[in-house]
Each structure stands twice: as structure tokens, then as C-alpha cells.
Image (spheres, grey):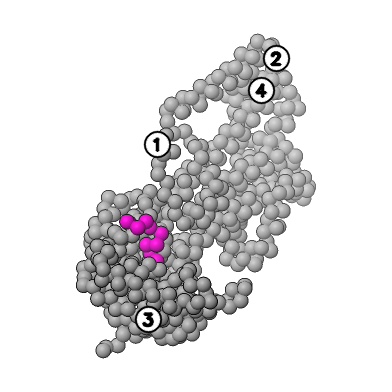
Amino acid sequence: MSDPYISVDRASKTYRTRSGEVEALRDLSFDMRRGELLSILGPSGCGKSTMLWAMSGLHPLTSGTVTINGRPVDRPRPETGMIFQQANLLPWKNVMQNILFPFEITGGSPGPHMDRIRSLIREVGLEGFEKKMPGELSGGMQQRVSIVRCLGYDPDVILMDEPFSALDAFTRDEMNELLQRLWMETGKTIVFVTHSISEALFLADRVAVLSPRPGRLSRIFEVPFPRPRSIDLTLTAGFADLALEVKHSIERSIPASAGGRS
Amino acid sequence: MSESLKERIPDFEQRSDASGSTLGGALSQPGLIRSGGQALAILAVAVLVIGGIEIWLRASGTESYIFPKPSEIGAALVDNFGLFWPHIVSTMTVLVTGFLIGSGIGLVLAATITQVPFIEKVITPYILLLVTTPMIALVPLLSAKLGYDSMSPRIIAVALASGPIVMINATTGFRRTDLGKIALARSYGASTIQLFTKIRFPMALPMIVVGLMMGAIMGLLTAVGAEMVGSSEGLGSRLLYYSARVQMDNFFAIIVILAAIGIIDYVIFTLIGRKWASWEA
């Protein structure tokens, strides 16, 4: 096997808060190949977002390293794009200005990217909305804008922090199918953090299950279903069996003293 | 009706800074006239009130030195405008200069101290002291030091009155940092200066415009007050001058001019708010 594209090596993170130290991650290691879609799955507070933010270079690890394409991550890098839980659009800019915001920061010219950006806008169904302000859009539409903003800028790696968790179930299914389509077309390497088992299994090539705080790797599942996957897949028996297995592995990773469910 | 039924989509940002949007909401008040019908109704009220006062004063035979008729005030305004003009210029010079100095310093200070929470906490009580102390009180002292006919005591008083209000509002605006948006900009490698110009400043803008509007109104009050206690120039000095001579038509004409300046101030900042901060409606 060739060198991994992304390599996380014994990542640990301890937060210092007023009430003492909180260990969020302990010795988490995993590798990803280029073009892979990996889901990080776990209960609330298992440190999965912490892991993602460390991969983005926004929050440093206490110890351990993240290496992307042979270079250790120590600060935010232009090859890495991030999509947040909230669409995080700038309310004083219209849809198109929001989509071009990354170029405004880096000082790069959006010119060579415009054709691709326009086709992305068409693909996610934002055509005709370019001049609208974010406040005029629904939550799902806002998140579409934030996806185009990230893809339009053409990063190699996309880090997604529970991007669809604030959306209703139907919009969420729609967005998952859309994301799969965009991923298959663009071949980006995507890390997708979620606490939804079915979302993780629907989207990912592999699902990394984290144990509760401190977050450690409890198991990695290979997801065998062929692509393109349809949302109907989530209602089949094979999918349910795998989901149940994942669920049990999460429950086993939760110590009895912690109360079981969260 | 259609506006009240318009679907509002709540999101995290709107919920997280609810305290800010109530203050910022001052900008989205229906301050400017939206339709011809509204304008006509407003005009009708003015005609009714002014006409009513005119008729009542005529019917009751009230003497002009007690309460001049609106028609006499109007005539004084037109006839004596040449006499008023130098004082309008004087007041406006004091107001604009003092306001620019005060709000400029206030804005720079607000932008700087909000970068360092400790300094912000130390300075804020003193700024509050400046906001709550009536700066007119300083004018006699300043006049004694800098000269009775000099403009500088009045300019200083206006700057001291408007600056702290601008600063307090701008500070509130700059403090409203949305960590998600900061993280977004940083993820593209934004510098500290870019974080300020691209995120913090536009986020704070609605509060800044509200602060500027309040600062300008406080500045006008202070300018007039300062002219009443410490100057022979300016519209404030004319109020004393005409009331002492029982020229009530001229006295009220000055009040009309002052009201007009206040309204112009309000309209200017409402328009600025519409243009630059309308996203927070």
C-alpha cells in the first residue's frame, strides 16, 4: 500500500477549563487514502469535532500529529476547506458574494474558477438565487451555499462538522444524496463528522467509531454498499444489519458507569 | 400584512445575538416614509396641528409675545433668515467638527480596546462616566480658559458628548464576535487585519451606525446648550437673545431650525443604516 494521504498519529487533546482539565481525545490514530470519504461517528462529547478542527489547523493538538499530503498540519492551509454545522454565511453579503468570499481572503482571482462555480450553483439548485441575501434562504439552501463556497474554492480536502444536523430529516436526505453526487464528481477527500449512524453509513467508504470522552478509536467499519447509493438503501435489511452492528459497537464503548445512553 | 406573514427562518446567529438585534432594530424602524399614502397622511396631521394652533391662537386673541401664531413664526423664518444664517453656520461648524473628532476617537478606541478584554474592562467605567456626565457643565470652565468667543470650548464639549456614546455602541458591536464566522475566515488563512475588516467591522456596523446617530443627536443638544451658557454665537445663543427681547416669533423660528437639523441628522443616519447595515432588519 502506498503512503496514506492523510495520517493522524496518536492525536491527543486536553482542554483547560475553569472546572479543571477535560481530556477530549486520547491517542487517536487513523490513515486515509486520497479521494476517500471517511465518517467519524460517535456520541456527543467524544471529541470528534475536536479531531476535525485539529485536522483543519484551527485548533492545535496537545500531542500527536496530523499529516496531510506529507506535510504536518500546524495552521489553516488553503488546500483544506471546512464546512460547519451552521452554514456560517455572512449576512451582509449576497449568495454570490458569499461563494466568492474565500477568494476575497486569499486574494486569488475567482476568474478561472467561475465556470465551475456556475455549474456548481446549477447543480445544487441555487440558480436564480445568486443575488438573494442569506436571510431570505431556508436552512437547507443556506447550507447549499456554504457547500458551493467550499467546493468553488477547490480545496483538496474537505472537513465537514455535522453539516446537516440542523436540518429536517427530508432536507437532510436530499443533502446527503447531493453530497455523494458532488463527491463522486470531484473526487475530493472528505472527512465527515456526524452522530447519525445512518448518515455515516450512507455516505462513507469507512466509518470510524469513537468512544466517549476521552475519544479513542473504538472500531473502523468498511461500508461495502456499491455507489451511487440511493437514500432507499438506508431502508434495506443489509443496511439495517450493519447499522445495528455499528450501534452495538458504540454502546459497548460506553462504560456502564457513564450511564449507557447519551 | 404580507410583511408580518413573511416566513422568518430562525437560525443560530439570530438566536445568539438577540440582544444586539433589538438595539440594531432601531435602524429598521419605519423611520422613512414608504408610500405616497403615508406621506399624505403625515402631511395632513401637520396641517391639522399647525392650522389648529393658528385658529385657536387667533380665536383666543393670545398676544404674540406669549405665543406667536404659526404664520408669524413662518414669516420670521423667511424674513430674518439672513440674520439667522451666520448662527446656523456657527452651530453646524461646531457640531460637525466636534462630532467628527469625538466619534473618530470613539471608534478607534472601541476597535482597539475590544481586542484586549482586560483593557476594555478597565476603561469601560470611565467611558460610562463620560456618557452620563452632562458635558455642558464644562463649558463655562473651558470658555474661561480658551476665550468666550472661541469655537474650541463648544467643539470640545460636543466631542466629549458624542465620542463616548459612539464608543459604547461600537464596543458592543465589536464584542459581538461570531466565533463561527471568525473560524471560517481563519480556515482560509485570514490575517488579523482581514479578520477585522472582513468580519468584525461589518458585524459591528449596525451598532456603530446606531451609535453615530445617537452621538450626533447628543452633540446637537450639547452644542445648543454650550452656546446658551458660553457663547454669543450660534443658535443656542439666539434662543437667549430673542427670549430676552421678547421676540417670540424669532425665538420659535430658531426652534424650528434646530428641529430641522435634528431631523436631517436622523434621516442621514437612517439612510446610511439602510445602505450599509440593512441585513440586520
Between discs 2 and 4, the one toward the N terminus: 2
Q: Which residue is drawn at the image coordinates 58% and 36% (left, top)?
A: B261
| Tag 1 subunit | B
Label 4 neighbour load within 10 Å: few <14, some 14-19, many 20+ = many
Q: Which mark's residue is nearer the viewer, 3 or 1?
A: 3
Q: Is residue A59 left or right of residue A2?
A: right
Q: Secondary structure at mark 3?
A: strand
Residue under numbered circle 3: A219
Which range is magenta?
A: A161-171
Residue under numbered circle 1: B2
Q: Which mark's residue is nearer the viewer, 3 or 2?
A: 3
Same-chain check, marks 3 and 2: no
Towards the viewer: A118 or B260: A118
Between discs 2 and 1, the one toward the N terminus: 1
Looking at the image, is B251 positioned above or below residue A55?
above
* Cα gap from disc 4 to disc 3, whole angstroms: 89 Å
Q: Is residue B58 left or right of residue A198?
A: right
Amino acid type, residue under disc 4 in the picture: Asp
Q: Which mark's residue is nearer the viewer, 2 or 1?
A: 1
Measured as percent of width and height from the top left, residue B78 is found at 57, 24
| Tag 4 subunit | B
Q: In the picture, residue A148 is in which quadrant? A: bottom left
Amino acid type, residue under disc 3 in the picture: Arg
Residue under numbered circle 4: B249
